[in-house]
Image (spheres, grey):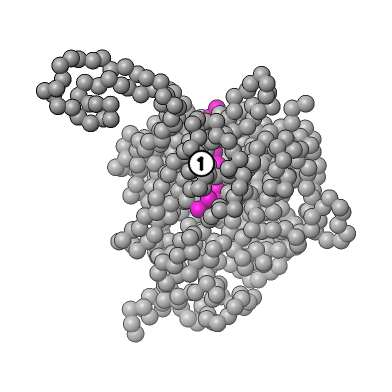
Amino acid sequence: MGKSDVVAEKFWPLPRFLFLAQEASIKPWQPFFPFSARRGFQPQASPFNLIEAPQTSHRGEQKGTWMQSPCLPKRDLLLSAVLKRRLGPWCSPTGSPAPLSCETGCGEGSWILVCRLLVPTQVSLLSMEEDIDTRKINNSFLRDHSYATEADIISTVEFNHTGELLATGDKGGRVVIFQREQESKNQVHRRGEYNVYSTFQSHEPEFDYLKSLEIEEKINKIRWLPQQNAAYFLLSTNDKTVKLWKVSERDKRPEGYNLKDEEGRLRDPATITTLRVPVLRPMDLMVEATPRRVFANAHTYHINSISVNSDYETYMSADDLRINLWNFEITNQSFNIVDIKPANMEELTEVITAAEFHPHHCNTFVYSSSKGTIRLCDMRASALCDRHTKFFEEPEDPSNRSFFSEIISSISDVKFSHSGRYIMTRDYLTVKVWDLNMENRPIETYQVHDYLRSKLCSLYENDCIFDKFECVWNGSDSVIMTGSYNNFFRMFDRNTKRDVTLEASRENSKPRAILKPRKVCVGGKRRKDEISVDSLDFSKKILHTAWHPSENIIAVAATNNLYIFQDKVN
């Protein structure tokens, strides 16, 4: 028995995990692996080495022996391995939608398209360099996306604290910052439009030679720091490294050096006969992005969340099994505040999916897990917060138990309300609002796309069931927004208990166009303005959204398109 056979026997006992290499589809009786047969499963590998094993990059380059599904990001492999290993008997659940219209705030005809932007590709960047003023770029070149690639897909969206800037990160490791157009007397309606302000390469692809692991350049999260001076600061992270960036403007340049000539070359001191006083000369506006701090080598697994503390001196970064606390001034060390990694990885039952600091209390934070639970921790109680202060979990209804229960209950995003009183979580089918004073059940539950319950089998087959949807509050915590498939996104009014479904589509991308509510029909006779659930395009999905901190302006990312909508002003 070779070494590989010993590993296979340890992790995958053949009597329990019988696998047919030629099987083209998953059968109800077939044991489940992180990969199906058509994706090139290698039975001698450990399921928990997936995160460290060579993977297939998003460019389609095969690294090592694994063949990764293009629908399932490799950062989710540990999560999928845990969930698929713990699934119960096969069952096909059913459900039906309950679409409603909505009133003022998120209702019919209340949202209009301000502009549709594309993340600038490399070709677009050449056009930007030819423009004199980078703040007044003509967006015409952004509207042709015929050369958009996988690297141009937007992976995160975030407004800054004032809402004047909007940052997006993409799978190519770039950060594009949009600035809000200033209001003019001649064009008052342009106040809500955003133009490209700055573009820079935040992360580059790397390779860990010790682990034979390719580190993607994809931007997982962006978080802004409050503005303290004329410059802006933001955090960006890929799977392993967090960077602090400074974005500043420069419209003057110094001239008249004594020891340098006009081209910057050093002059011979013997030729200097007079002294000059350097002066500042006007120049074309230049927006510079410089890395001020690089926080690396602290995460074994993939970073899924970063959150800035309310003291603005520290922040935390969370991966699948650990959460680290950083000081902005210290890059060579961090403090581990949560560690759920078991001594034996075979005993692993859940992973960390998201984490966030309390907006007002610097000692409090929450993190969610793949089992649908939320833990509130207080750093004053213990340095290592493995023991939570509060534990939020909704008891499962046995009548709703199904084969996919554990997968769809996994929380993909967790957000504190601006007031700090409530927590919002997003799982695959619902958005839930929790009161910090009540742990046994959520106070509000909103069905996002309950009509997909009958489609969970096919969604599992194409790995869409592992999609991670984000959720956001509006500025007053009265409306919730989250994404869905077919480029739909949903809004829920907490006061009126009404909801609306809107679509971000290129077909409806005429500026100032009013968005019409969409409805999904499950069965029976379909009305003219409805779309059948069988006609939904699952390759078009709204995973990342953002809401202006004080106004009704939203940003919705659909592949490489960024849609900006605002509440209609009568």
Residue furthest out toward the left:
270
Residue 515, image quadrant: top right
Amino acid type at mark 1: Ser
Q: Which residues are magenta?
A: 151-163
Residue 526's place in the image compared with 474, above or below, is below
- Judged left or right of residue 259, residue 170 is right
Residue 534, image quadrant: bottom right
From this viewpoint, is residue 394 visible?
no
- Pointer 1 residue: 127
| Percent x, y of residue 343 | 38, 61
Residue 154's place in the image compared with 61, above or below, is above
Residue furthest out toward the bottom:
1
- Judged left or right of residue 439, residue 66 is left
Q: Is residue 412 magenta?
A: no
For the point 44% across and 26% down, the residue is 284
From this viewpoint, is residue 93 visible?
yes
For the point 84% across and 50% down, the residue is 529
Quadrant of the image containing the C terminus: top right
Pick the front one: 532 or 335: 532
Pick the front one: 147 or 558: 147
| Percent x, y of residue 530 | 82, 52
Q: Is residue 155 magenta?
A: yes
For the point 41% across and 76% down, the residue is 44
Pick the front one: 465 or 447: 465
| Percent x, y of residue 237 | 43, 45
> How many neighbours does mark 1 have within 10 angstroms: few (below 14), some (14-19), or many (20 or more)?
some
Quadrant of the image containing the N terminus: bottom left
| Percent x, y of residue 373 | 56, 50
Give the secondary structure at mark 1. helix
